[in-house]
Image (spheres, helix red, strand yellow):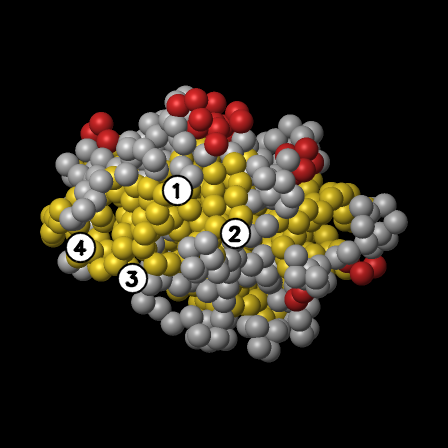
Amino acid sequence: MFIVITFLLQWLIALHLPLSLMPTNSVKIDDFVLAFENLNTRSNSLSTINYIPFESKGGHLQGIQLYKENTIYLSGSSEELSYIVKINLEGQSKVMAIDTLMHSPLRHAGGFQIFEHYLAVGIEDNKKRNLAYLQIYDLESQAPFDQPIYTIERKGDFERVTAGAVGITAFRGDILILVANWDSRVLDFYSCPQQDFYDGKGLFTLKNSIEVKKQSTDEWSDPKWESYQNLNLFSDKSQQLFMVGTAKNKDGKQIADLFELQLEPATHKVKKLSSKVFNTSKGVDFKAAAGLNISDSGTLILAAAPYQLERNTNIDLFSNNSTKFSTWKKMQAWASPDARQAAAANEHYIYAINNHTISKYERATGNLIVTKNLPNTKHLNSGFFYKDLLYCAHSNYPNQPDSSSIRIIDPENLILTKTINLGESEGSLTWIVKNKEHWYALFAYYGKDNHLTYLAKMNNNWEIIGKWTFPKKMIEEMGKMSISGGVPWKEGFLVTGHDEKKLYYLILPKTGKTLNFIEKYKAPFTGQGIALDPLNGGLVGINRAENTLISSQLMP
């Protein structure tokens, strides 16, 4: 194999400081194995919007990394070129740029890693499979992808010199780079002195190569080696070297495997320590893009994406620190005197729901489009979009006995099109949603009876075919009030109380009649009716005291 090492110095012009003064420290974890084992296998999901047209035919996403607190990078391939996607998480999460890396035949950008402010990625000819380039870019330069700061050319035998996954870290005074070839059969390790790297005069040399099939698996946690799409490098405070690979295994499970590496001159060894299976949201696939990061606070975060970048793309985030990580952030707010009971939204409009009034606002400007006072209504509680119609839960609260109905509204003109009368009900209807093939409705009790509040499963004839109550500790947090809002989310439901800025995630139990509590989140809105936000994959709610509608998204 013929390897040519080159480096480029043009980037110095774009920097305000000499490279020797640039930050050189990266976050080190005390016990990397423990941090990996503590990764939550349930994801927090965010949705990002892409308004930039581009042609992805003939390729797919393969790498993903978080950068600082507000950016995600994705690598991808197409028939004509390799590219990098930049996503900004501030405000509305959206794609900010799609930058070309190289053109055909170097059309395939593989798994990559960010170390400090350096992005290392492999770009290969995935058809002839005899040529690849390892490129290192400085993310703090003015136009980082116009010119790499270091390039390693890999040219040689079929599939031996490809570069499908790349990792980078600092290790024992060197910058160490891992390049995995086709299906990660061989791991090549390049290194250069760390200070030379920062000074712009690094010269990378091939240090070690490990042919995985020749490794003994006697000491491995299990003998399986996958076709890893991403391989990330890390070292901990005790100067141990670790590698984490992500893939979809033959059973269709999304997995991350932890390995310890030994690269001593006489010992080139990879040892499998652990394997974890992760539960992804719809479309997200570790065979596409999954990558591990350490945040500035020392939190381990695993990110994953689908095969393709769509107009709306879900990204899953798994963390070993759910308390710091699970935060619903306010994206936008709109003033409305009718933000008293609930909010609802579609892509272009947001709706404020009051007891017997609904107001429609343009999302982009906040301009009021129309307000309607609905006849014969007492207490509208929530809104849920289904087949382009707005389904509102309605009750006679606080009158007794309880009586509930569903009011179906045309969102274009806010005209009441149909009423589904549920008659006298056990409890007061506060929200109704469709989840898969069934409807789910919340019937609330208040005061000393609020522990009787239940979630009902209904068929298409609005007949109750299942009931579940809520955990005692959760109901105690409601005081004398009850569950006011809810939406289908992941494998269960997100619900709110009446006044507190809290969201509760619950799932249906396999046995028994009490919902299983999974997690509690801080929310940027108070209780009352919430709804799914199709624009960003998040939620909309209200702050009654401030008469505002609020959109929110789960963010790192």
Kindly identify which residue carries mark 2. Answer: 465
For mark 3, give the secondary structure.
loop
Q: Earlier in the sequence, mark 4 or mark 3?
A: 3
What separation in Å lies between label 4 and label 2 (alpha carbons)? 31 Å
Q: CA distance from mark 4 to mark 3?
A: 12 Å
Q: Could you give the CA–CA distance between mark 2 and mark 1, rounded to whole angstroms?
A: 14 Å
Residue 184's spot in the image, x, y percent? 68, 61
Can residue 17 be seen in this snapshot? no
Contact flag, marks 4 and 2 (Cβ < 8 Å): no
Viewer-nearest residue: 352 or 60? 352
- The amino acid marked with disc number 3 is Asp
The residue lying toward the viewer, choosing from 113 and 153, is 113
Which residue lies at the image location 28% right of the left edge and 33% below the top edge? 399
Circle 3 residue: 388
Q: Earlier in the sequence, mark 3 or mark 2?
A: 3
Looking at the picture, tell me which residue is in the foreground, 512 or 185: 512
Q: Which residue is mark 4?
A: 414
Residue 442: quarter of image: top left
Q: Are marks 3 and 1 in contact (CB under 8 Å)?
A: no
Looking at the rendered image, the quarter that the C terminus falls into is top left
Q: Quadrant of the N terminus?
A: bottom right
Q: Position of residue 38 (x, y in %)?
A: 64, 35
Closer to the eye: label 4 or 1: 1
First in sequence: mark 4 or mark 2? Answer: 4
Q: Which residue is mark 1?
A: 425
